[in-house]
Amino acid sequence: PPEHLILALESSCDETAAAVLLEGRRLLASVVASQVEVHRPYGGIVPELASRRHLEALVPVVSETLRGAGVDIGDITGLAVTQGPGLIGSLVVTLSFAKALARARRLPLVGVNHVQGHLAAVHLGDPRPGWPHVGLVVSGGHTSLYLVRGPASAELLGHTRDDAAGEAFDKVAKLLGLGYPGGPEIAKRAEGGDPAAFDFPRARLPESPFDFSFSGLKTAVRTRVEGLRDRAAAVADVCASFQEAVVDVLVEKTLAAARRHGVKNLVVCGGVAANRRLRAAFRERAAPEGFTVFFPPEALCTDNAAMIAMAGYHRFREGPAPEADIDAFSRLPR
Ligand code: KG4
Ligand code: ZN
């Protein structure tokens, strides 16, 4: 029988996800049920609707995952569930489900920090980085830099003071009248645009070089767009220039953190790490200095449960013993 056959559940935002991971190596199944259609008419996530939809989707998603993995719930050796940060109502639905399942099946349960999950996604790819590495978590909810010393130890070096990078993509897409979520929409339009057409600001924050700020950029884009006579004609250039400004800052600060801490390996994860231009810019600028950049597989950059399973696996192997009772948290504990 397997030593570690982990069933993981994730529902911190607008995806209901489950995955089964064997011995921290073989991903047997990963199912993500997106709610994007539920929230699209609102141009953003409606928390009440998200919790309700998770409740409906959970049992079908878990059944499909077990079936897809070809395993029975009786074969599972441990459960991992996202504990936070995220939408509290969404977290509580799945955490309650996981606790009930753990008790009914007498399974150990570990709570996983969603951000640790994003960082762990890179270990589901090939090649995988060793430790230590500098990790940039860049998503709709987070833009943070970590010094990752081991599988269960990430030291926060800096984070965004206002919007997350993904949030900036979503907000700029909205003001340009593009679809939701905005990241992929902007990336698509940017392909046909000139990244140097508009000189948008880069917030360098010299007094805290590993912190980020994107609200000034968003405002600059709004001001420029409002001043344009023919907005439609400029969309591709605005998208390309905006994307370039975000990418510049993310690459620059991550490289600076790696230099400062004498670390050669970089990990870039979270939904925005699916961005092709970001990946290319990291590769171009890291190589000449001898840095190696690792990305999770593209499909595992946005929210999923495979990454929670991997973080849970590390936790089962190296972390503190599973606690009997865990609570959801909406914000990161400091
Ligand atoms: O990690 P994720 O699925 O959820 C959070 O934990 O936030 O990230 C979603 C975010 C959204 O803001 C979305 O617009 C952004 O990631 N995103 C992208 C791309 N794909 C997703 N941003 C830029 N380029 C992309 N290709
Ligand atoms: Zn996420």
Image: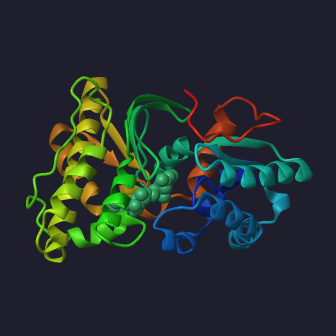
Residue 122 x/y as whole percent:
46, 50
Q: Residue at x 28, y 68 (%)?
A: 176
The C terminus lies in which quarter of the figure? top right
Q: Is residue 296 above or below residue 161?
A: below
Residue 291 x/y as whole percent:
25, 39
The N terminus lies in which quarter of the figure? bottom right
Instruction: Compare residues 296 and 208 and report the one nearer the observer.
Output: 208
* Picture quadrant where residue 60 is located: bottom right
Q: Is residue 275 left or right of residue 74?
A: left
Residue 77 visible somewhere in the drawing:
no
Q: Residue at x 65, y 37 (%)?
A: 315
Q: Is residue 260 above or below residue 268?
A: above
Q: Is residue 152 left or right of residue 82?
A: left
Number of callouts in the render? 0
Q: Is residue 175 left or right of residue 72?
A: left
Q: Is residue 34 left or right of residue 223?
A: right
Residue 46 visible somewhere in the drawing:
yes
* Picture quadrant where residue 319 is located: top right
